[in-house]
């Protein structure tokens, strides 16, 4: 669709498209299925992912953040999941489209709360893309992560994830293996690349 808002940041736009596509592919009866985020079902991961995108937008623009706590998603049914995701993606993309690429740093909702424009946009992309993967594998869809997307996401993950583990935002990293770039990213984020709902 040509009317989709884009940020102009390639990694973020690819991550937004992954989230958009995966949310649109969730079967109607799959919203309560378990996900790699062990405490959350598919609906809760969607709510968290959308809230985080709004949080990044709010940090940049000063506009209100999400109307709920993304780290305590309710799991209440979302009337129109695709529209819910699209609203958050649009707010994030619009905010990032207005960022001065030459700025020394931009505000972010995650530590260190100020990053270079590239790192900030990639951190926002990391959140969208990894939760797109969570939803995809929980609902029987193909992984939306590609080596081309995983490469910059792993770079920014190595910049920001360690302090977030202490808050429970990411699990402990899994033992590295001779993985491809997608699996290496997932393991660094504490996710089993071969996770299945029955695992």
Image (spheres, rainbow, N blue to C red):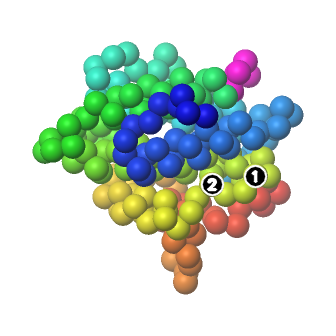
What residue does disc 2 label?
144
- Identify the image quadrant of residue 56: top left
Nearest the eye: 90 or 65: 90
Q: Is residue 140 left or right of residue 44?
A: right
Task: Identify the residue at image location x=52%, y=56%.
Answer: 171
Q: Residue furthest right?
A: 29
Q: Residue furthest front?
A: 2
Task: Identify the residue at image location x=79%, y=52%.
Answer: 140
- Identify the image quadrant of residue 100: top left
Nearest the eye: 172 or 178: 178
Query: From the image, which quarter does the N terminus lie in?
Result: top right
Residue 32 showing in the rendered view: no
Q: Is residue 7 left or right of residue 84?
A: left
Label 2: few (<14), some (14–19) or many (≥20) C-alpha neighbours in 10 Å: many
Query: From the image, which quarter does the C terminus lie in?
Result: bottom right
Q: Residue 55 colored magenta?
A: no
Label 1: few (<14), some (14–19) or many (≥20) C-alpha neighbours in 10 Å: some
What residue does disc 1 label?
141
Residues shaded magenta: 75-81
Q: Is residue 54 left or right of residue 26?
A: left
Q: Is residue 136 left or right of residue 92?
A: right
Secondary structure under the numbered disc 1 in the rendered image:
loop
Nearest the eye: 29 or 117: 117
The numbered mark at residue 94 is none
For the residues labelled 2 and 1, say whether their Cβ atoms are less than 8 Å apart: yes
Residue 193 showing in the rendered view: yes
Task: Identify the residue at image location x=61%, y=38%.
Answer: 20
- Identify the image quadrant of residue 49: top right
SS assignment for the magenta stretch, majority: loop
């Amino acid at each position: 669709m040509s009317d989709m808002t884009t940020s102009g940041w390639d990694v973020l736009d690819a991550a937004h498209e992954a989230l958009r596509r995966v949310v649109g592919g969730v079967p109607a009866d799959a919203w309560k299925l378990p996900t790699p985020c062990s405490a959350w079902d598919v609906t809760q991961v969607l709510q968290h992912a959308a809230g985080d995108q709004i949080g990044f937008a709010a940090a940049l623009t000063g506009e209100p953040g999400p109307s709920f706590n993304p780290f305590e998603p309710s799991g209440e049914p979302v009337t129109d999941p695709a529209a819910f995701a699209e609203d958050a993606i649009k707010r994030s993309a619009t905010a990032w489209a207005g960022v001065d690429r030459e700025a020394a740093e931009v505000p972010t909702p995650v530590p260190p709360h100020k990053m270079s424009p590239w790192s900030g946009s990639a951190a926002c992309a990391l959140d969208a893309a990894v939760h797109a993967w969570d939803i995809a594998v929980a609902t029987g869809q193909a992984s939306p992560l590609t080596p081309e997307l995983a490469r910059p996401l792993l770079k920014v993950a190595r910049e920001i994830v360690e302090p977030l583990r202490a808050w429970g935002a990411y699990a402990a990293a899994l033992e590295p293996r001779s993985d491809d770039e997608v699996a290496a990213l997932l393991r660094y984020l504490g996710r089993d690349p071969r996770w299945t709902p029955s695992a």
